[in-house]
């Protein structure tokens, strides 16, 4: 990843800081445990996981790694390691060439 892109995403100090820190009644640890167990997450759970449940400005990088590892583990449990794609051909047939 280029340094220009990294600084545009994380800011010049290399930290990602919030304009507004969301406040929920959920704990990060509880939300992460629910995600690891495959339970349905509430909005508050999602906010805690996205904001890494930190009181300090910016994202806690250790907690971010824990969220990423939990997500990757759940992905592997659900769909495995095989990668698939759908080839979608959207042909728009017109008679524009037959005008004249």
Image: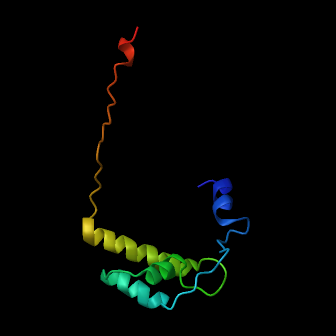
Q: Can you tell which quarter of the image residue 17 is in?
A: bottom right
Residue that appears at 58% across and 80% down? 60
Along the line of sight, the residue nearer the viewer: 15 or 23: 23
What's the coloring here?
rainbow
Quick check: 53 left or right of 8? left
- Residue at 39% x, 73% y: name it: 71
**Nearer-the-camera pick, 34 or 67:** 34
Q: The N terminus is located in which quarter?
A: bottom right
* Residue 88 locus on image (x, y percent): 30, 41
- The quarter in which the C terminus is drawn is top left
Total tally of numbered discs in the picture: 0
Residue at the (49%, 76%) spot, across then down: 65
Q: Is residue 32 left or right of residue 73?
A: right
Up/down of 99 relative to 29, above or below? above
Residue furthest right in the image: 12
Return the x and y of residue 10 as percentages of the image width and height: 65, 66
Percent x, y of residue 61: 57, 77
Residue 80, how many percent across, how many down? Answer: 26, 65
Q: Going by the image, does 41 lie left or right of 61?
A: left
In the rendered image, the residue lying farthest to the top is 100
Q: Is residue 72 left or right of residue 23?
A: left
Quadrant of res 91: top left
Q: Nearer the viewer, residue 38 or 99?
A: 99
Residue 32, image quadrant: bottom left
């Amino acid at each position: 990843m280029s340094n220009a892109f990294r600084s545009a995403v994380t800011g010049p100090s290399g930290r990602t800081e919030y304009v507004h820190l969301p406040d929920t009644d959920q704990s990060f640890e509880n939300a992460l445990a629910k995600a690891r167990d495959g339970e349905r997450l509430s909005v508050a759970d999602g906010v805690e996981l996205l904001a890494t449940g930190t009181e300090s400005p910016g994202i806690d990088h250790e907690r971010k790694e824990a969220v990423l590892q939990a997500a990757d583990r759940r992905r592997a449990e659900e769909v495995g390691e095989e990668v698939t794609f759908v080839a979608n051909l959207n042909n728009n047939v017109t008679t524009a060439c037959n005008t004249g």
